[in-house]
Image (cartoon, grey):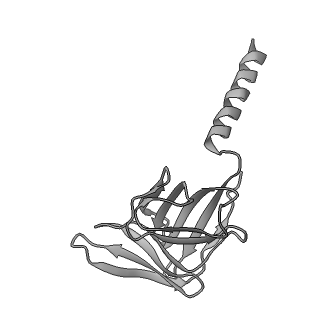
């Protein structure tokens, strides 16, 4: 009986893993850290192979390729300041979203604008390879740069 329970548990786990990560899908983790120690971490999920040389997403509504993008912002002590499901089920809820990925090199290119988009939110914006800035939006909708740094966003596949 114990062997049957183990076997059923293993089959169930395999089914869950298969449903959670479709064959041919890619998940990448993003990480940026500013000069003052604030950081942005994210997880990006898109089907593979990409239908184009680039995966490019802009604005609100149906996405072209990205199924999911979740972004979290942390203060220098590691306290999470906000988490944003920017893209969920192939729909962006951020009118300012801008993300371009080169899937062959698994690198971001061009302009980047990810995170929140409304009062009391945080977002990361800048030009890859140039400069990035982390912004906060106060209760009156005023934006302020909280941290900045190089336009380097580390990208890697998650540890499994």
Question: Residue drawn 45% across and 63% down?
Answer: 79
- Quadrant of the snapshot with the N terminus: top right
Question: Residue drawn 48% across and 62% down?
Answer: 72
Q: Residue furthest left?
A: 140
* Residue 46 coordinates in the image, percent (x, y): 61, 57
* Residue 145 coordinates in the image, percent (x, y): 38, 82
* Residue 108 coordinates in the image, percent (x, y): 61, 74
Q: Residue furthest right?
A: 3
Question: Residue drawn 55% across and 76% down?
Answer: 33
Q: Is residue 20 left or right of residue 57?
A: right
- Above or below, comparing residue 100 to residue 11 in the picture: below
- Count how many numbered circles sit on residues in the image: 0
Q: Is residue 5 left or right of residue 78?
A: right
- Above or below, comparing residue 112 to residue 21 in the picture: below
- Above or below, comparing residue 51 to residue 123 in the picture: above
The residue lying toward the viewer, choosing from 66 and 27, is 66
* Residue 76 coordinates in the image, percent (x, y): 48, 72
The residue lying toward the viewer, choosing from 69 and 36, is 69
Residue 128's image quarter?
bottom right
The residue lying toward the viewer, choosing from 46 and 158, is 46
Q: Residue furthest top?
A: 1
Q: Is residue 121 left or right of residue 139?
A: right
Q: Residue furthest front?
A: 51
């Amino acid at each position: 009986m114990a062997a049957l329970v183990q076997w059923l548990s293993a089959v169930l786990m395999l089914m869950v893993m298969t449903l959670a990560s479709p064959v041919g899908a890619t998940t990448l983790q993003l990480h940026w850290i500013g000069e003052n120690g604030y950081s942005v971490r994210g997880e990006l999920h898109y089907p593979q192979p990409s239908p184009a040389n680039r995966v490019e997403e802009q604005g609100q509504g149906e996405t072209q390729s990205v199924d999911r993008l979740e972004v979290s912002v942390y203060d220098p002590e590691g306290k999470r300041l906000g988490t944003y499901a920017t893209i969920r089920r192939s729909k962006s809820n951020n009118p300012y979203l801008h993300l371009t990925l080169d899937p062959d090199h698994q690198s971001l290119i061009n302009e980047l604008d990810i995170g929140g988009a409304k009062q009391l939110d945080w977002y990361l914006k800048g030009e890859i390879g140039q400069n990035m800035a982390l912004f906060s939006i106060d209760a009156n909708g005023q934006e302020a740069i909280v941290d900045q740094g190089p336009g380097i966003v580390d990208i890697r596949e998650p540890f499994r």
